[in-house]
Image (tube, rainbow, N blue to C red):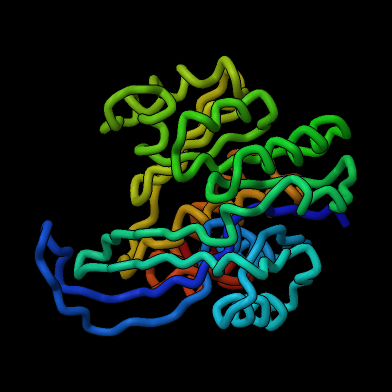
Amino acid sequence: MRKIIVVGSINMDIVSQVEKHPRLGETVKGKDFSYIPGGKGSNQAISAHRLGGDVLMIGKVGQDAFGRTLLQFFKNEGMNTNSIAVSEKITTGAAFVAVDNSSENIIYVSGGANDNLMPTDIKHIEMDRGDIVSATLETPIETTKEIFSKARKIGAKTILNAAPATLDAETLFSLVDYLILNETELSVFAQTEIPKTREEVIGAMKKLQKNVKNIIATLGSKGAVALAGKNTITVNGHRVKAVDATAAGDCFVGAFVVALQNDKIIKDAMDFANAAAAISVQRLGASSSLPTKNEVENFLTNK
C-alpha cells in the first residue's frame, strides 16, 4: 500500500480552559488543564492514521519525560516510531493552549527539538512513486525542502500545510502539489489584508497560483475553497456546536491526505476532510479530538 510520510512537529500540549483570554498584564484563572499530545505534524499524522492511512511519522523529541510519553503515545496508536529522532541535548517541544468559553484559542509554541530536525535526520527515509509526503512549517524549512526535492524526483505527491506562515516558505512552493492554508496564512503569502469574503479569498489564492497549481483555503465554519488549475471548488461548513478548534486544521489536512491516498478527486477529498474537522471541533484538545474513519463515515451518512 502507498504510504503517507508526515514531516513535522511533535509537542506536548498543555491545555487550559478559561472564561476569557487575558488582556496585556492581566491574569485569568483557568478552570482545568490537561497534557495532550500535539504538534501540527503529530496531529496530522494521527489524524491520517485513525482515518485508515498507512502513515510514517518523521519528527524529533527530547530525551525527557514529555519525549518518552509522546513516543509511547504513538506506539499505543499502533504507529512505528523508528523515524522519530531523539535529541539528548534539546527538550521536547511544547505548546501552551488557552481555550475560552467561545471555543476560541490562543496558542504559544516552544519548538524545542522540532527546531533541530535536520536533513541528516531524514536521509534514511525511503519513498516510492505512489507515496504522499506532507509537511508543515513547525520544523526547519531546509529539512522539508530536502524531502520534497526527493519526492519530486521520483514522482511522489507533496502537500504543504503552510502554517505557521512565514514568507521564507515560498522557496518550497515550486516543489508543492497541494498547498493548504487558512485565511490568516493566505493573507501573509498573498500580502493582503485577511480576506473576509469568499471572493476575497479566491482573489488572494490566485496571487499564489503562479507557483502552486492546487491551493486549498480552509475557512473554519464556512467550509473550504480550492483552486485546482482553472477550476474553483467549494464545500460548505457543517453546523455543529464547537468546543475547541485547536486541531481542526490539522484534522482537515490529515483527512485530505488519506482521501488522496485512496484516489479521491479533490472535491470528495475536501468533503471528507471537512466532515472530519467538524467532528474534531466538538471535542477538547488536539490529538484527543481526532476522529476515526467510522465516525467520519457515520457523520456524512447522517447529514
Q: Residue at x 39, y 55 (%)?
A: 238
Q: Which of 116 and 258 is in front in this view?
A: 116
Residues 160 and 199: in front is 160
**In the rendered image, the vertical position of residue 91 relative to residue 31, given as above or below:** above
**Looking at the image, which residue is at 39% across and 74% down?**
14
Residue 99 percent coordinates (x, y): 28, 68
88 and 263: which one is in front? 88
**Near-viewer residue (144 or 226):** 144
**Residue shown at 70%/68% (left/top)?**
86
Which image quadrant is residue 152 in?
top right
User: Is residue 270 placed above or below 239 in the rendered structure?
Assistant: above
Is residue 198 shown left or right of residue 275? left
Query: Which part of the image, by quadrant, shows the N terminus?
Result: bottom right
Residue 273 coordinates in the image, percent (x, y) = 55, 53
Please determine whether, in this image, residue 162 is positioned above or below residue 121: above
- Left or right position of 17 against 47: left
Residue 36 image point, x, y percent: 47, 77
Q: In which quarter of the image is residue 264?
A: top right
